[in-house]
Each structure stands twice: as structure tokens, then as C-alpha cells.
Image (cartoon, rainbow, N blue to C red):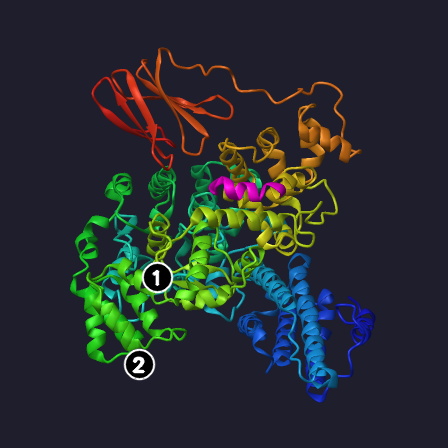
Amino acid sequence: MSTQKSTKRKKQRGTVNSSGSPPVPRPTNKNRQVYDMVNVGLDIAANIAEGSEILAPLKAACRTTKSILEATENNQEEWTELTARVNGYMSTIEEQIALFETYPPEDMAINEAFKRPLVHYVKCLEDMHDKVVNLKEKRRLDKHAFSKAIIKVKIDAEEILKLNRDIEDRHSQFMGALGLFAALRIQSVERNTKVIKADVEATKANVEIVLTDVDSAAILQLPTAAFVASSVHRTCLTGTRDAVLQTIYRWADDATSDKPIFWLCDIAGSGKSTVAMSAAEAWKKEGVLGGQFFFSLTSSEGSTTDKFCTTIARDLVDYIPKLASHVAGAVKRHPSLIRSSLQEQFRMLVIEPLHHLQGRVTLVIDALDECQSGSQRRELVEMLSTAVREAKNLKIFMTSRPDPVIQAVLGSLSIKSKLEDRLHDVHHRDNIDDIATYIHKELKEVLPEAKRLRLAEKANGLFIWASTACRMLSSETTLDLPESIYDRLISVDQTGEIDDVYKLVFERVDLRSYPAMSNMLALLLAAFEPLSIDDLDDMFKNLGLKWSSRALVQNLGSVLSVDPSTNLIQFRHPTLVEYLRRCSFASAPNKPNTLHLNVTKAHGQAASWCLKRLMSRTDGLKFNICQLESSFYLNREIPNLKARISRLIPKALRYASSHWLLHVAETDDTWRSMVKRELEQIIQAPHVLYWMEVLSFTGGVPRAIAGLRAIGRHTGGEMWDKARMDQIRRFIMTFSVPIQESAPHIYISALPFAPIKSILHIEGAKRYRNLLRVTEGLEEMYSGLPSSLRGHESGVNSVEFSPDGSQIVSGSDDNTIRLWDAATGQAVGEPLRGHEGWVLAVAFSPDGSQIVSGSYDKTIRLWDVATGQA
């Protein structure tokens, strides 16, 4: 950008604000200082396009951020969150400046690929500054206007929300670019170059790392699980868990150990995740952490292995930059890698890159028991067992509750048996002392020492009991005195029973707030991903309820938390989720002061909200939602696609697109009839095609197919056009590959080649006149299921559908068991063999991961659905 353009731009800034409103009055002296400060930053920003150093955009961002903070200083409470966020971002940027100032000039060169997100970030800050100053000036004028002397002007909450969202998205892209710059764009350095930083010297010595823009784009294609462990888990308090941590560190440092896997196995609430966080932080500082994955049953992405390998691979790039080119190479050689099996993904993205590394690498995998599919858990553990044999420099630290399947698979690879007695004994002296130390630290200013000791005894060695009790006693939102809460904690019958503490937490809530609290908890329990404060408020608004979700969450701060960077509401521990699920089945829902959650109703409320989000005129579905300039590129070839998705597909719309079908499936007929009108709208063209666009960009096609199958199992009543729903499912299944590869190909490839008499083909031809026309060879309709499924060699005694309706299992007189795809009628895999007599009965487990069979040979067998192993 030339100097002339920069001057013109600054002149425009003085006459037109970003919202198109009339010019603002001449600023006060204080605001004049702000303008002077920001102009310095913007002068730098105007020349970024011609600059060659990373410091230019960094300093521009820092100065502009400071000006925003000054403009919001002493503003009203609505700005508190925004100010805190911007202040945190400024600290991060200042740290990056300090780091890059130590680099030699030749290592600070940037090209167009990295320049773009930096320029966009500074532009975002510039626009944000204009809005902040304009809003503040408007407030000042309104405050002094005679006609509004009595009325307090409120700043537009939607504007503040938008500012929060914009700054969060741009900062994320900005830091992503900086991360790649620091990790990947280290230019080749000659052998004798003198480097200031010793760690940089170790990285660069005799190593040439030149990653192209294509390599960077390849790495950014790898999806990551959205769950952020640090938003829920913390590291151990200094002085606690020392014995266990030292044992773990000795294992990690022992190069001669024949136990490459450390399995920390313990009961719920014992502090396993806290230990895992501490170990991960220590190994990260040491430079040997390869990646981490914290499973969570409250997140659909965090409770499956679907994004496990790609998340670990992205971590590998961040933590060990010299492996970046090898990870990128794997993605470039195998463009469809993310649809490969778990074993193939891990081999190509993790194991093969590790062959190029001399030193050891440790992976941290927490809460493996919160991976909801038993077959996925088994597959993951088997894969990791194979991986540590293939990569001798790989060590794996994992945690879970006791699980016989994990123990059987790991066998001699794990050192779990060496620590079993110590970790399972809650009365062990180390355990008791650690909890006492924790309580003394947390409640030093709240309770006298004698009562703190009594509370430590009451915890009975369970960390989750102690931490929840401490948060109750330290809460600033409760009206109860700490002494009163202490007396009630001590009075519970059982020691160390976490359910008693949870019951006490909810009993303390004002009776008038019980309906709101119960409804909120049911919604959080029904949600397939963590909801934000804004999402929950929007749900309440959709239901006509005038409740504040932030106030409700604050009242339950001992068991719920809010991530300050995302506003997502998190359950503090999985034992709370289990307790609430039991409450959802409790009787006497109208009994006062008793928690009862109607999760079925909550699914209906969530379904209603999702459908409203999808059909919103402002933030809902639309044609070409990501504003693509060309239809010739595959999704993975679109520049800055992740940024486009973040900016143009709001988080609420992403959630609604992924989960509306499953919410409809999980509610009852009463709620299904209430959302019938919106549901019928969304399954009509063009909205159903716009919905598929979002699925294409967000990787939601498999989830949609599962949802369509789930909703198809409800046969009662005329809730919707079942034939249309079935054809939509068949359309997505038939064209799942082109839909996932390229959103424009929904229109270019899928519609023209759909069966000629199918609903979407007919409606698409009428609506989109320029579509490709296929004159011969198209089927009239989707082929139906075969009238009979053939494969057994003798009579069939028993059949059953899987819980999700996707598979059929059959047992036969030929002594075998067969699995069938319910959608196509095709046999899945080879027959399951093991019985020596007729198979008389078969059944699926409730989660669909196992099959049980009974035979004439007088035996009962359990089978893993994923592997076919007995």
C-alpha cells in the first residue's frame, strides 16, 4: 500500500465512521491523545504491504490495542469482558514482540501468505477502535443532552457482542499466523551463523527448514477437536501430588525402560486430569511433548476419536517445528487422509514423521474412559500399543478409570501394575497430605485451621470432593456464611461421597430460581457441544423466558465454569454430568428443593432454537455462505477457508447445522409437533441445499447422516414428510464424497446426477436453470433395499437392529454371526466365527459397541463390533 493511499485513507477516517453514520464531533483532548496513538499504529499498518519484517504488524497491533484500552477506560460494566479480552491479547502481542526482537534481521522476513492475516488483524483493530470511540462519544453526548438527562443510555449489547466475536476471530487467525511464522518459516541458516538465542541455535544448527505456502495450507487442513483442556482442568497445586509426578517423570526420562506406556488408572474424582495437565506442562517446557488429547463426554468432538490423530498431528507441528514439513508432506501425498482409518492416519501423520527425530517424544491422553464408544476405545488403545512398538522414541502417558479392556490390550507394555496399590488407596498418607495442603491453601482466609483439617478428613482422599467444597466456601455470589456451609458439609452422613456435595450445592439455590436452574442444567446436559452464555441467553429468549444465564452460572460456580476466551459453559467434572443424568431419571419432579431435569423437554427446546438459527434472515443459512469467488476449487484449496468459516458461519449456526436432527430425534412427539413448521421449511429446497453447504465446510456430513437415520426411526404421527427425509439421506449418502470435498459441487455434481425423479433433482432443475443437464443414463429413483439379505449358509435364528439403527446382526445355524448395513443391505466384514454350534440368540449392547451371542454349544460370547474379535 503506497504512502499516497495511506494519506487518503486517514483523510477518510476523519469524515466517515465504520457504520456509515454522520461525522463524529471533534474529539476531546483525551480522545485526541487516543487518535494520535492509533495513527502511529495505523501509519505502520499502512506500510505493512511493503514491509519486510514481522515486527511491523506486531507493533501496529500492539499500539492500536493500547488505544482501544484507553478508549474503553472507565466505561460502564458492559465493556468489562471486552476490555479484559483486549488487555490479554495486548500482553500476548507484547511477548511476541519481545521474542522476535531477539531474532537476526534475516529471520524476520515475511511473505504474502503470512502478511495477510496480520494486515487483517490490524484492520480489525482499526475498525474496532473507530466503533469504540464513536460509541463512547455518543454516550457522552447523550449523557449531557438536556432531553435525556434522566434516561441512562445503554450501549448496544449486540454491538459489544459483535466486537467480542470479531476480535476473537481475528486474534485467533493472527496468533495462528505468528505460530506458523515462528515454527515453520525459519529461513535456512548457514552452518556458522551466530544466533542470539541458544534454543533457536539448537533448532537451526545444520538444519534447513523451508516450508512453502502449500505446506502451511496442508497443515491447516487438519481439523482439531474444539475442546480446550485448560478451560476445565488446572495443574497441580505446588506441593501436591509430588510422589506420583516424580514417578511419572522418572518413567519418562528412563531411556532403558521397556514400558513405553504409563497408564494412570484411578477412580473418578481422584485428580487424574490435574496430574495429566501438570505432566503435559512440564514436558512442554522440556521440549519433549508431542501432543495432548483430553477426552470429554460433554463434547461430541472430545468424546470420539474422529479428530484424535489430526489434533495430535497439529500439536506435533506446534511443539516440534522440525517435523512440520514431514506432516505437511503426508497431507499432500494423501489428500483424503482424514477419511482414512484411525491406524492409517496415526501412522502417516505421527509415526512416520517421528522416524525423522532422534530424541524421545511423549504424548498425553487424558480421560480415555470418556471416549463414549467402547469399540473406539479399544481401537485407539490397540493402535497406540502398535505405535510404541514401531516408533521406539515414542512414549505415551494416559489416564482413565479402571477398564479391563484397556488392561487386557496394554498387557506388559504398561507400568500401571507398579502403581496400582498406591493410586487406588485413597487412604494413602501422600493422598491425605496432598488434600490437606490443597484445603489449607484454598481456605486459609476463610476457615480456621481446625475446621480446615476436619474438612480434609471429610474429603476421605477424594480430590473432587475437596475442590468442590472449597469453591462453595470461597464463592462470592452466595448469601450463606462460610460457617453455615461448613456445618452442612460436615453434617453429611458419608465421607468422600461426591453426590452428597452436589446435592448440597443445588439445595442452597433459592427456591425461586429452581425452575430456571433446572431448565438451564437440562439444556447443558442435552447439548452435544458446550454452549456459550450467549447461546443460552438466546435459547431463553426463543422460549420467551427472561432469565440471565450468566447469573445462573455464577450461582453454580462451584460446579460450573465459563471459559473467559470463548464464553463456553463447562461442567467442572464428569462426575457432575453423571449425577445430573441420574437426576434426569428421578421421580417426583414437582417436589420442592429437589433437582429434577427434563432432558427430553430440553432436547425439544434445543431443537426449536436450532431451527430458528438455521432460518434466521440475518445469521442463518444462505447461498454461497462462505462467499467463494470460484467454484473450481476443492474446499482444501480455498485460501483462508478456516477464517472464512469463522467469520461467515456463526458458532450458533455451526452448532445448529450439526445437531438439529439429533435434538429432534431425542425429544418427544409433543415437541416434534411444535417444531413441525420450521422443520418442514428446512427440508425444502433451497434451504436444505444451503444446509449441506455448511455441512461441507464444517465436516458435518457423517453427523447429518447419523441424525437422518435417527429421525427416520420415529414412526408415530405425521410429524414430517418421511419420504422427503429419506431422499435427503439417500442424496447425502450417495454424494457424500463430492459434498465433503467441495461445497459448490452440491450444485455442480450432486444435483445433476441425482435420480431423475428424485425430489431434489426435480426442485434443483427448476430453481437452478444453468445446471448441467444429463440426458441419458440416470436412474429414475434411488435403488431400494434388497428384498432379502443373503450370506448365511443355513437357517437364521435371531436378528436385531443396532441401537442407532445403522446395522443389523444375525445369528445362524451355520455357527456364524453376520453384520449388515441397514441402509444398503450389504454384509459388513467377514462372518464372526467362534461358536461350535448353532447361534440361537444375538443382541447389541446399549451403546452398540458389542454383540452378545448365545449358542447351542452351551457358551455365550461377547464380540467387538468394530474389530469382530470375541
Residue at horizontal 56 percent and vertical 48 percent from the top: 608
Which region of the structure is painted magenta? 665-677
Disc marking residue 189: none
- Reading the image, the residue beneath label 1 is 593
Q: Residues within 10 Å of mark 1 (few under 14, many from 20)?
A: some
Q: Position of residue 25 (x, y in %)?
A: 78, 82
Residue at horizontal 53 percent and vertical 70 percent from the top: 92
Alpha-carbon span between mark 1 and mark 2: 31 Å
Element on which disc 2 rests:
loop
Q: Amino acid at mark 1?
A: Asn
- Whether the magenta-drawn stretch holds residue 728 is answered as no
Q: Position of residue 40 (x, y in %)?
A: 70, 78
Q: Is residue 643 visible?
A: yes
- Whether the magenta-drawn stretch holds residue 667 is answered as yes
Which image quarter is the C terminus in?
top left
User: How would you classify the magenta stretch by its main secondary structure?
Assistant: helix
Quarter of the view holding residue 105:
bottom right
Q: Name the foreground residue: 7 vs 525.
A: 525
Sooner in the amino-acid sequence: mark 1 or mark 2 = 2
Disc marking residue 445: 2
Q: Amino acid at mark 2?
A: Glu
Does 329 appear above or below 543?
A: above
Does 205 appear above or below 386?
A: below
Q: Is residue 211 visible?
A: no
Does 249 appear above or below 718?
A: below
Q: Position of residue 538 (x, y in %)?
A: 57, 58
Which image quarter is the N terminus in?
bottom right
